[in-house]
Amino acid sequence: FITRHLYNFFVADEPQVPAWDIEEPRDPEAINMMSKTLVDNDYDIKSVLRAMFNSDFFKEAQHQKVKSPVEIVVGTLRRTGDLIGSDPKLEALAKEPGYMGQDILDPPSVEGWHTGREWINSGSLVKRVNFVSDRVSDTGLPGVRRMVEHVGNNGSTMSAEELVDRCLDIMGPVDVSDSTKSELVSHVETGGDIELGGESFSRRASETFALIAATREYQFG
């Protein structure tokens, strides 16, 4: 029970706790290794964490957890620089995770929130996408300006695929499927040749950030 919780928090999303009696762990070998380490070390949690963090399954588990609403909001604010220090917007922004299903410090029960894919439904997904898209497309924000500068730091010309690759890198990095990347590149190509620098480039880069925020892959961290 303990090691499955650790696996769920640090490695990859597991089914919800009430289902654990009937559903096998996502990676039984990993859970068994961690459980044996826990027992062999007199239930010392540090030993389990050390074994887990040094394991292959931990190192290979990228993008296996759906970002929680708090992770979406805080990560976006830090990336875009939308909230720095004391700001009148703080109270309103603190309510944003609640609109996505996670009222801060107010879980629905002692069990806590159901995590993983249960963060995603038709209503919360729209809120998640809109929250991120609105901010990463705002070139007036200092973090977004830095993102655009990073993407444009590549000589004097850039292909549509290069623009998408650099935007994916700074937005995560985000690993997307071939079909998703093809759609992103196709959208950028409709805008014609890419000229680095100026408002036109800032607009195209920020539009690409917003499109990436709407992808399925961006929801995983």
Image (spheres, grey):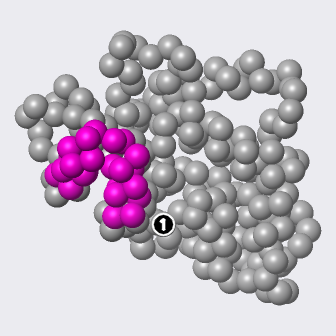
Tell me where residue 151 appears, x and y as whole percent.
75, 71
Where does the magenta region start and end? 32-55
Tell me where residue 94 appears, x and y as whole percent.
67, 23
Q: Residue at x 81, y 77 (%)?
A: 153
**Taking 29 as reference, is 150 left or right?**
right
- Asked whether residue 154 is drawn in magenta, I would say no
Q: Amino acid at mark 1?
A: Asp
Q: Residue at x 72, y 50 (%)?
A: 79
Q: Main secondary structure of the magenta part?
A: helix
Q: Examine the rendered structure and indicate whether residue 147 appears above or below residue 219.
A: below
Q: Residue at x 67, y 64 (%)?
A: 170
Crowd around label 1: few <14 · some 14–19 · many ≥20 (10 Å): some
In terms of image quadrants, where is residue 129? top right
Q: Secondary structure at mark 1?
A: loop
The answer to whether one can see residue 220 in this image is yes
In terms of image quadrants, where is residue 62? bottom left
Depth check, front residue: 15 or 206 = 15
Q: Residue furthest front?
A: 42
Tell me where residue 180 appears, x and y as whole percent.
46, 65
Q: Work out which quarter of the rendered image holds the N terminus and state it.
A: top left
Residue at numbered disc 1: 175
Q: Residue furthest left?
A: 22
How many labels were placed on the picture? 1
The answer to whether one can see residue 14 in this image is no
Tell me where residue 179 appears, x and y as whole percent.
41, 69
Q: Examine the rendered structure and indicate whether residue 192 appears above or below residue 212.
A: below
Q: Residue at x 65, y 52 (%)?
A: 210
Depth check, front residue: 13 or 73 = 13
- Asked whether residue 49 is drawn in magenta, I would say yes
